[in-house]
Amino acid sequence: MIEPCSLLSLATAVPPHLVAQSEAKELARNAFGGKAGLFDRLSGVFDNAEIASRNIVAPQDWYGHGHGWHDRNAVYLQAAEKLFVEAASAAIDKAGLEPNQIDGVVTVSTTGIATPSLEARAAQRIGFREDIRRVPVFGLGCAGGVNGLSLASQLARAEPGSNWLFVTVETCSISIRLDSQHPSAVVATALFGDGAAAAVVKAGDHSAIRIGGSAEKLWPDTLRIMGWDVEDPGLSVVFDRAIPPFVEAELAGAIDAMCAKLGLSRDDIDRFCCHPGGVKVIDAIEHSLELGQGALNLEREVLRDHGNMSAPTVLFVLDRLIESGLPDRTMMTAFGPGFTCGGLLLEAA
């Protein structure tokens, strides 16, 4: 039997610049002005994305100009550190702890390069101890919210009594590439927002929410479904149009296998808490798991209010689910580069 681990707190943060979807569409139309055919062919994605607004890390006029690796990463470092401090400090405070009581921190971020990593850069501002354990993780993409929280809970269980902090920060918007001729460049402009989330976990029964077992599914020969291409001007998003049909065809089998590993069946799950990568992905999840249209209402709300923030997004959904009343048994799920799916069981104590 897996030793219980408690979710002591959860906090979210967004950057200060808010852009309405109508504004984003007009900005993109002007920015892609030299590629009018490309934009006009795909402009409907702004209207059909069911996104009302998003928070972004830079002022709107920043996105109307070309930027190279150095400039993009400079924005990432400044914004990600600030978001890290805000989300982490809030989570520690909500857990009733002081920063010097945090024994280890797992940091998940895939939208920029930070060496030293974000938790080291933020350590003094937050007040971490000098002997804190640091586990920075890169490359999980949208799956990072689930897999990162799972990793933090496993590390907490390995040392009973320790307090582990999990923080995920993503600045997806700075990857927007006006030089690209690929349709994914326009789709990313219509979907991406920025944000951060943090949680504190501790082995044992210390709160009303227990973190149970976790599982993952990695599909072979799927590397080009989702991810980043590293190019001279910056990261270039990889979005395959096959993502929604792939999810619809494959998710149910993957979830059933994960549940079996955890000694459960899919019927034992009261609520799925899913990463809302896009409205078509949400539809695909509902169809695959036979949840019924609209079952993932909170996922749609988060997508509407924040867009796709990559890894933190599923934790924004969880935050709303906790506020509305966490069911007895919830499974968090998220897809990411690999192509992979992560699952994490939560139980109301």
Image: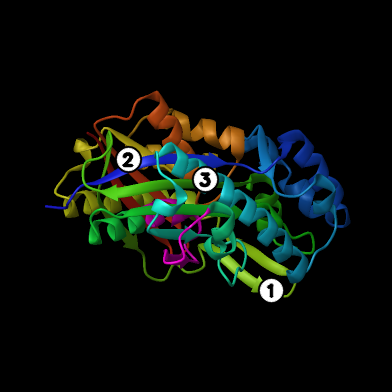
Residue 152, label in figure: none
Quarter where residue 287 is shown: top left
Q: Nearer the viewer, mark 2 or mark 1?
A: 1
Q: Is residue 226 left or right of residue 253?
A: right
Rendered position, 293 above or below 261:
above
Depth check: give the residue in front, 209 or 69.
209
Of label 3 and label 1, which has the lower sequence position? 3
Identify residue type, mark 2: Leu
Cα distance, mark 2 to mark 3? 36 Å
Circle 1 is placed at which residue position? 231
Q: Which residues are the magenta region?
A: 127-149
Q: Residue furthest left?
A: 1
Does residue 50 show up? no
Circle 2 is placed at which residue position? 289
Image spot of residue 104 (x, y percent): 39, 60
Cα distance, mark 2 to mark 1? 37 Å
Depth check: give the residue in front, 181 or 191.
191
Is residue 141 on the magenta stretch? Answer: yes
Identify residue type, mark 1: Glu
Image spot of residue 149 (x, y percent): 38, 52
Does residue 289 show up? yes
Q: Residue at x 43, y 60 (%)?
A: 106
Q: Residue at x 28, y 36 (%)?
A: 207
How was the colour assigned to the protein in this rendering? rainbow
Image spot of residue 52 (x, y percent): 66, 32
Identify residue type, mark 3: Ser
Of label 2 and label 3, which has the lower sequence position? 3
Image spot of residue 92 (x, y percent): 45, 44
The secondary element bearing badge 1 is classed as: strand
Circle 3 is placed at which residue position? 89
Rendered position, 201 above or below 180:
above
Task: Give the mark count.
Answer: 3
